[in-house]
Image (spheres, rainbow, N blue to C red):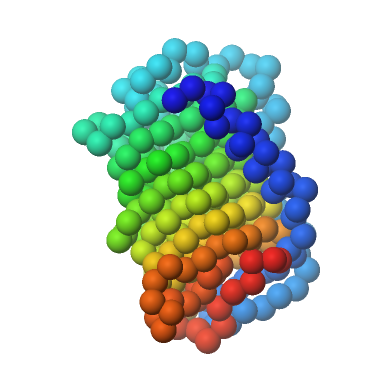
Amino acid sequence: PKIGKNSKRIMKLRKAMHNRMNSDLILLFGLVLGLVTKPMVVFAACPPLVAKRDGPCINNVTSWDIFLDYAEKEGGGEVVFCPFSITKNNDQKTAELLFRTHLICPSGECFIYGPDKHIDVRMPSTIQGFTFQNAVKTAVRFFPLTGESYICDCTFKSNNAGNLRGGALRVASKVTVENSVFDDNQAKEGGAIYMRPKAFLTVSNSYFLSNGAKFFGGAIYVYDQATTLVVNKNRFEKNYLYGRANKARGSAVYLAGSSDNFHTNDG
């Protein structure tokens, strides 16, 4: 796929995200079950992409294997990419971040397509400015680890985990998501994001559009009372459930074990 094919739509979604941030909620699910709403300041955990746009970047990423070499480099550290568009095939290895790694695409035009998983995060890392599309399994998985990871300025589009959980992200540690778009992702539970036990997820200034789950959590599934979700200034729109009506719950956010589930897609 060419970089220009989807970039206009993705940039349009990102613009819509920033223009329509009218939800001001904090969702606490940990020591106390339930849904609590109150004003909250905007988070600023992610560095601005503009700070890296005039610096050097890697400009020879023309295949998944080349990207893999940079993403998995010994010792980790910061890796800054120029725009690229690559496809990962089923028979190619999933990228594993085994060191503290910061993958940054200052242009916001680094596109990763293709089936199967894209990235497994096993050490605290940052992924910024990427688009993950058409994964057939969870696109990015965060394993249990000590420390915090970040998803910044990313787009997750048309990833479908089928009968698995979490179409775009599966979170089992402390993760912050900022300024990101989740569009048309699907899974059995947690169409965009599935939170595993004891995960701690903060999501702010992000846009959840047309994500679907078969049973629970069209956009986000929160596992249980040992799991914490904080959401601030996000937009949930047209997220849905496509399973049997008597079992399906939480078209936007589903809180397992609680009678309070976030159904609205307008705030």
In the image, is residue 260 above or below residue 152? below
**Residue at (49%, 44%) from the top-left corner?**
157
Image quadrant in which the C terminus is located: bottom right
- Residue lying farthest to the bottom in this orientation: 259
- Work out which quarter of the rendered image holds the N terminus and state it: top left
Residue 84 seen in the current view:
yes
| Horizontal side, residue 45 vs residue 114: left or right | right
Above or below — where is 232 with respect to 251?
Answer: above
Question: Percent position (x, y) of residue 88?
Answer: 33, 31
Residue at the image position 61 percent from the left and 36 percent from the top: 9
In this rendered view, identify the residue nearer to me: 70 or 158: 158
Give me the residue at 52% from left, 23% from top: 3
Left or right of 90 on screen, residue 123 = right
Residue found at the far left of this picture: 91
Q: Is residue 145 above or below residue 24?
A: above
Residue 252 x, y percent position in the rendering: 56, 67
Q: Position of residue 108 (x, y in %)?
A: 60, 30
Q: Is residue 48 left or right of residue 88?
A: right
Number of callouts in the render?
0
Residue beneath the point at 32% across and 56% down: 162
Q: Quadrant of residue 209?
A: bottom right
Q: Can the viewer see residue 228?
A: no
The x, y position of residue 19, in whole percent, is 77, 48
